[in-house]
Image (spheres, rainbow, N blue to C red):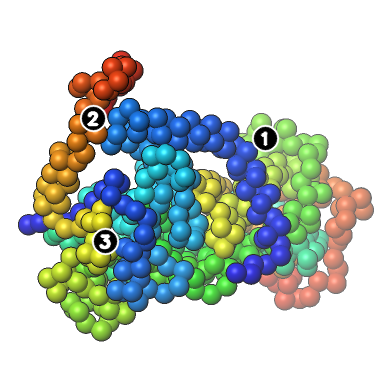
Amino acid sequence: MARMKFLCDAERCIECNGCVTACKSEHDIPWGVNRRRVVTLNDGVPGEKSISVACMHCSDAPCMAVCPVDCFYQTSEGIVLHDKDLCIGCGYCFYACPFGAPQFPQDGAFGLRGKMDKCTFCAGGPEADNSEAEYKKYGRNRLAEGKLPACAEMCSTKALLGGDADVISDIYRNRVMKRGKGSEVWGWGTAYGKPDAKPATPPGAKS
Amino acid sequence: MSRPFLCERLMPVVGILVALVFSPIVHAADAGRAQEQAQRQQTQPGNNAPMWRDVRGGVKQTTQVRGVETNVLMQPSGQSWREVRPPMSLAGGLLIAAALLALFAFYQWRGPIGVHEAGTGKLIKRFSDAERLTHWTVAISVCILAVTGLILSFGKYMLLPIIGYTLFSWLAMFAKNLHNFVAPVFFFMLPVMIVLFVRDNLPGPGDLKWLLTFGGMFSKSGHETPSGRFNMGEKALFWFMVCALGVVLCLSGAVMLFPNFDQGRQIMQSANIVHVISALVMIFAASFHIYLGTVGQRGAYEGMRTGYVDETWAKEHHQLWYDQVKAGHARQHFADDAPDAVRAQVADGLKA
């Protein structure tokens, strides 16, 4: 059985936010809720990197552990899903999640939380596959249609990969091995030093 | 996006306070790492180790998505919160269970504390109407908050396996909403209670002796150590439970109740930990108060229910206060105008 995973290649992501848009349009997500976002690290500094992040479908998911009504479940493919009929909108999953994946549509005054919404890996919810009820609560169930998550499919530079962990890590491994040439190759600096003969790395640093 | 005026003014202040605690370290690291990352790209292209260290540290970055802390790629404190909470709840749950067991054992051993002489039928107005209204508003709201809070904390382990997912989810939803809407009642009545009761809870003569003898609870004669209007046990309860824990509960609860002030997750996690610990200690302490105020002592419940106590009850449980009332020095007086229904109720409460 496949183990579904997202992988974002920081060398390829160009912060176009296409994945965010694809997700919003695919699932008809309301205003104020973003199941996926792109974070740029060291924005404006040479070497800045962007990474697209959503629910990472953890094996030992903190949201599942802290939910007071136990509304989360994990599919046989490792996708972490939740039952909105059980969710009480307490926000504990939002406290616990390292990635900020759980989203809460505002429901009433004083920021009262509605039912939690998060990335489903385009796998819907507990309702019947592709049913009207499932679409309304969780968005499209693309996996049931034999498709991969919309964000990864839409990614213009194929930085965001989504699918079976074995397959996408093979793709990523291939990229890393073949990326760049000469001194740009990953690990070159450690192995051979820089072309200008200066010691490339301080002793003990890894490349 | 328009927000209430108050929060626009207040939140920067809170934000600055929080930032003052954390920012010097974060910002120094931020600039250092960004520079390190830039340098690393020159010497070792493709090695993003400095950037990943930032990610693991939960440093604020840049994003186009608007929202609370959307610019933090990973927050490491959530895992700590997740690991701290369950053992803490378990310890608190065991503490409450132990308290209930101890009270049950004590009741079996000692039974209700009665009065040694018969009631005289002469009543003293012990609590004013304002005091009773405040006491019962706080008492009832605390009971509702405690029960709903316990459902949310322990229901997953104790109720869910019995009543099932659908029913428990409905119950938890009800508990959450009740908790959130009763909380403001507690929030606004607590200061009133503190103001009304603080005067007679200040340290007074007899307190130390009462404390050293445990109020005479274990004395052979069964007589209580003389005390003022409130004994040392009640005073401890007032200062510890009402003034300290009550205020902490209100403040930590407000942090979690109003996510619309855009506070971060770290402050909410801390608030949750503080709220759970103080709530469990509060329930622990309150169970002793409720025990003594209901089944544990004859005449106590009627005293707060009606506001009147029998002369004998006052003499045996609060002798110093009784002497003051008799001498006319206390603010409470003998009430000869008490209605007959109240007289019957008070007399009934004293009966074994």
As shown in the figure, which amino acid type bears the numbered disc 3?
A: Cys
Query: Under tag 3, what secondary structure?
Result: loop
As shown in the figure, which amino acid type bears the numbered disc 2?
A: Ser
The image quadrant of residue A119 is bottom left
**Chain of the residue under the numbered disc 1 shown in the image:** B
**Chain of the residue under the numbered disc 2 shown in the image:** A
What is the number of the mark on residue B211?
1
Query: Under tag 1, what secondary structure?
Result: helix
Query: Under tag 2, what secondary structure?
Result: helix
| Real-space CA distance between mark 1 and mark 2, rounded to the nearest whole angstrom | 79 Å
B191 lies above or below B61: below
Residue B56: x %, y % from top left: 38, 39
Query: Which label sits in the foreground, 3 or 1?
Result: 3
The C terminus of chain A, quarter of image: top left
Residue at 26 percent of width and 61 percent of height: A155
Query: Which label sits in the foreground, 1 or 2?
Result: 2
**Chain of the residue under the numbered disc 3 shown in the image:** A
Q: Which residue is mark 2?
A: A183
Q: Which residue is mark 3?
A: A155
As shown in the figure, which amino acid type bears the numbered disc 1?
A: Leu
Q: Is residue A9 visible?
A: yes
| Real-space CA distance between mark 3 and mark 1, rounded to the nearest whole angstrom | 72 Å
| Real-space CA distance between mark 2 and mark 3, rounded to the nearest whole angstrom | 28 Å
Q: Is residue A32 left or right of residue B251?
A: left
